[in-house]
Image (cartoon, rainbow, N blue to C red):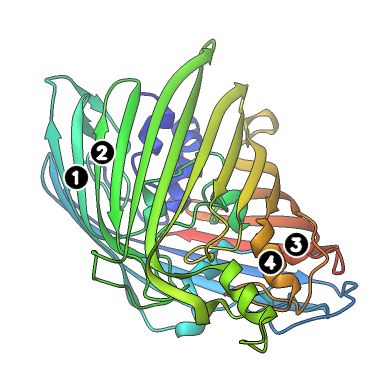
């Protein structure tokens, strides 16, 4: 079983970046021991991120803008993972989480926001909440069993080479789709929303990033195919999910192909499509109503209709390159005539990046990475914002359109057992797609503890 595949069984954020280095270093990377042969697990993690940006030029600022005055913010996400292996093919997992603090400018004004942890929306309060509640059933389709990586939400260490995996319950869509071992983790890797995820993938989620649904996945030696049916929120970026699946739901399908195009180097290609049905507005209707004098300002919320369809596609590549270096590329496009609804306000995106483990300088559990992402809007979406409209993240009161461009670099250092510290810098050009604002640099410090 290739290391890339074992990681992509599920994305528990801190684990995806860590495990290749763990295997290499043969070191303890949690504060407390957690035996691989135990049929149960109780394990925690804590992630604290502090970010700061200096003042930057802005010709104007709206209610949904990144603030041009210097500011800082600190976020905290803590998770308790519990899981029970009922049999070699049956498992349950329950995760309790809390989110506190917040992001700069209360997480407004950027499509590629600088801290993925605030997708948990700490403004809802710091009380603990149910993050995941999963039932997982594996159906063997071959007699050959292979090693897989144990994770806090999947305890199996061996599974059939060919199999069906069925997961039901409360989950994160991003745990199963658009996974990338180089850029999918805000706890040890990159922090930006549109580096760790495909920005154009408007994946089903409530305000905290979770939903209820089912995922069915077929696994074979060199490929996999997965399908997910999820609940959508009742309103854009809403906390309440719509259980009427006749009018509101999300279909996700992804084909994964594993290869060795480079000798002795693993690579993976993932092809994604999603189809969201929800109470969505049309940007063109909001624009036309404003021009006709029906609305004082363009208002997408006033032009929603149940059952509208938004769809999109993604391409996700990861490749081991040389020595400890890996690279990744993401491309994404979504139907930008309908409003951004669940993740962020991006209609097309291109991202490229790489990371490297620290073996060459004697720090095998350290990691360094750099990535660039360019995000864009559809013609209707940019006109809507230019006329003074706003979405759930963006709205400067006007818009001189330019693609939002982000360059991010980080270094993560292993301090002791399960304790890691990171420094990160992000350079943002045209924040919120606006050439009249910025550029701005955001610096970050991160402390991560695996208990």
Work out how far the residue at label 4 is from the one at label 2, CA to CA, in angstroms. Answer: 34 Å
Residue behind mark 3: 433
In 3D space, how far apart are the residues under numbered discs 4 and 3 (Cα atoms)? 8 Å
The relative height of residue 220 versus residue 30 in the rendered view (above or below) is above
Q: Residue at x 53, y 53 (%)?
A: 335
- Ranked by sequence position, the earlier of labels 1 and 4 is 4
Label 4 neighbour load within 10 Å: few <14, some 14-19, many 20+ = many
The image shows residue 216 at horizontal and vertical percentages of 23, 43
State which quarter of the image contains the C terminus. Answer: bottom left
**Mark 2 crowd level (few <14, some 14–19, many ≥20, 10 Å Cα):** many
Left or right, 36 with reference to 376: left
| Residue placed under numbered mark 1 in the picture | 166
> How far apart in space, not on screen, are marks 1 and 4 (Cα)?
36 Å
Marks 3 and 2, Cα distance to the nearest angstrom? 37 Å
Kindly tell me whether residue 368 is visible in this rendering: no
Sooner in the amino-acid sequence: mark 3 or mark 2: 2
Image coords of residue 159 (percent x, y): 20, 31
Instruction: Determine the residue positioned at 83% across, 66% down.
Output: 400
Of the residues under marks 3 and 1, which one precedes in the sequence? 1
């Amino acid at each position: 079983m290739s290391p890339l595949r074992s990681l992509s069984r599920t994305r528990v954020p801190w684990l995806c970046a860590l495990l290749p280095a763990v295997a290499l270093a043969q070191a303890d990377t949690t504060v407390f021991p957690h035996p691989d042969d135990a049929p149960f697990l109780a394990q925690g993690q804590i992630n604290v991120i502090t970010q700061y940006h200096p003042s930057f030029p802005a010709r104007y600022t709206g209610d949904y803008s990144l603030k041009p005055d210097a500011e800082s913010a600190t976020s905290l996400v803590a998770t308790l993972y519990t899981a029970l292996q009922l049999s070699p093919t049956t498992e349950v997992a329950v995760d309790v989480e809390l989110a506190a603090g917040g992001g700069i400018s209360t997480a407004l004004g950027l499509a590629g926001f600088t801290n993925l942890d605030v997708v948990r929306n700490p403004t809802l309060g710091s009380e603990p909440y149910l993050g995941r509640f999963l039932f997982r059933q594996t159906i063997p389709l071959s007699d050959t069993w292979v090693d897989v990586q144990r994770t806090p939400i999947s305890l199996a260490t061996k599974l059939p080479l060919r199999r069906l995996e069925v997961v039901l319950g409360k989950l994160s869509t991003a745990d199963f789709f658009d996974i990338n071992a180089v850029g999918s983790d805000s706890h040890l890797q990159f922090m930006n929303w549109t580096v760790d995820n495909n920005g154009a993938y408007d994946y089903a989620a409530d305000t905290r990033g979770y939903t209820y649904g089912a995922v069915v996945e077929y696994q074979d030696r060199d490929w996999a195919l997965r399908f997910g049916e999820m609940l959508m929120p009742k309103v854009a970026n809403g906390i309440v999910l719509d259980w009427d699946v006749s009018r509101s739901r999300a279909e996700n399908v992804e084909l994964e192909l594993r290869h060795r195009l480079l000798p002795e180097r693993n690579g993976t290609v993932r092809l994604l499509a999603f189809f969201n049905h929800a109470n969505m507005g049309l940007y063109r209707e909001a624009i036309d109503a404003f021009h006709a004098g029906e609305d004082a300002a363009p208002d997408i919320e006033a032009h929603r209709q149940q059952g509208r369809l938004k769809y999109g596609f993604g391409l996700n590549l990861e490749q081991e390159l040389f020595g400890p270096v890996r690279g990744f590329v993401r491309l994404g496009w979504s139907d930008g005539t309908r409003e951004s609804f669940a993740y962020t306000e991006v209609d097309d995106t291109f991202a490229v990046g790489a990371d490297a483990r620290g073996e060459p300088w004697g720090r095998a559990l350290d990691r360094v990475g750099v990535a660039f992402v360019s995000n864009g809007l559809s013609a209707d979406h940019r006109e809507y914002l230019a006329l003074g409209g706003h979405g759930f993240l963006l709205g400067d009161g006007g818009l001189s359109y330019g693609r939002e461009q982000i360059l991010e670099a980080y270094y993560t250092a292993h301090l002791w057992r399960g304790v890691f510290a990171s420094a990160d810098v992000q350079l943002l050009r045209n924040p919120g797609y606006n050439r009249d604002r910025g550029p701005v640099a955001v610096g970050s410090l991160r402390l991560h503890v695996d208990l």
